[in-house]
Amino acid sequence: MSQLPNIENDSLAPIGEEQKTWKWFEIFNIWANDIQSLFGYTLVASLFIAYGVTGWTAFAGLIAAGLLVMFLVNISGKAGVDYGIPYPVLARASMGTQGAKLPAMLRSIVAVFWFGVQTYFASTALNLLIVTITGATGGDSYFGMTIIGWCSFLIVWALQMVIFSRGMDWVGKFLNLAGPFVYAVMIGLLIVLWNKADGQLLSAANSIFRHEDATFSSELKGFIAIVGTMVAYFSAVMINFSDFSRYVKDHKSMTLGNLLGLPLNMIIFSALALLITAGAAVVYGEQLTNPTAIVEKADSALLSIIAAVTFFAATVGINLVANFIPAVNGIVNLAPKSMTFQKAGFITSGFALIIGALWTSFISQVGIGAFVNTLGATLAPLYGIMIVDYYMIRKQKLQLADLYDESEKSAYFYSKGWNNIAVIAFIIGAVFSVSTVWVDALAVLSGYAWLLGALLGAIVYRVLSK
């Protein structure tokens, strides 16, 4: 590895060896928090129902997706381990010292939006906890939330501010605490349902997800759709995984953490989701995919309190992984010598406060999701471009000093700070990915839009680079 450059007052400066304190457990908990959120459970549980496949096919699809994502993040995260650089800096090698600001900012906008939304959802868990303990109803609603709801939202927002203001050390500690804790409520739910099902849960699960009319064709289509759905779910973290891998001690720790956190964690989590969903169907006569609804029907005050705390921790955890870090690094990248981690964190949290506060009453009503999905789709080809550039063009050799040099002397200055070849590949791949969001004829590819967009960007960039 090249000698680290002497970069003063740059919040995106490479991490030195003494600062690389993360091991496999921290990486494992990144994926634990990403998978084990309220939305993650609902998504996984619904896959056993929505695609009309047998339980084993859905299970195999989830494991295959975990293996594929593991492979992709091992590739995208290696530069972070090798050079200690975050995603916006890695993008400079292929896009140019100025050109990298565009994809970094697009990723930041998407992250800021979902950061606000997830803050709101985390507050609903706290709201459930307060209502369970006090028995209060919260009274009238104001802009979509009761007084208790508003208090919960502001408390969650402020708590995240405290965690984020402490820097990445606190972020890592919170992830280590929140990740394993989620399994407590799932195991608790499973025990409750097992007892109420009188030991018939396993046989019921087998019969519920058997699908007598299933054919090889329908099973294959369902398997492919499930893999595509889960890859799309993880796509946001795949592209900026170097934001986290830069803190890892060595490459072995990253790969072990990804192995345990993705396919292995997916096996355990999916098995629990499958059994809990089946148990709920047996006990309550409904195929419930929302764990909150199952907890409410379980009619256990203790379990409700544990669940509320767990859902809160899990949702804040995914906010850290998928939203806060990429948002902060994207904002810092606009002015790395004057914008600090803390300043960018306050800006991110400020926008999140507005978005989360208006989510129920306004934003969720105007269909802004398509706009955000469009921005997210534009990022797909950048993954392919960065991978081809790092592995095939540069043979994993980067000039660190030039990555932080915005002058014409930099090897990555290209044409006025923009690599035109990468920009062309970026546009071609982004047009395709965005088309899958808006063109009905391409809607069938939406689950694989990210993978195909990344592949298209990689091919165009490699051809033009020759």
Image (cartoon, rainbow, N blue to C red):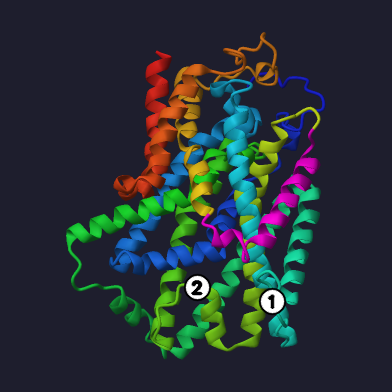
Q: Residues within 10 Å of mark 2 (few under 14, many from 20)?
A: some
Which residue is the site of mark 2? 290
Q: Which residue is mark 1?
A: 141
Where, quadrant-wise, is the C terminus in this rendering?
Answer: top left
Front position in the image: 436 or 170 = 436
On screen, residue 30 versus residue 151, left or right, reads left
Residue shown at 46% from the left, 58% from the top: 266
- Label 1 crowd bin: few (<14), some (14–19), many (20+), radius 10 Å: few
Q: Nearer the viewer, residue 81 or 403?
A: 403
Say which quadrant the N terminus sits in.
top right
Residue 7 point in image, percent of width and height: 78, 22
Q: Secondary structure at mark 2?
A: loop
Q: Amino acid at mark 1?
A: Ser
Q: In the image, which residues are magenta?
A: 339-367
Would you place residue 455 above or below residue 218 in this image? Answer: above
Q: On the image, which quarter does residue 358 sit in?
A: bottom right
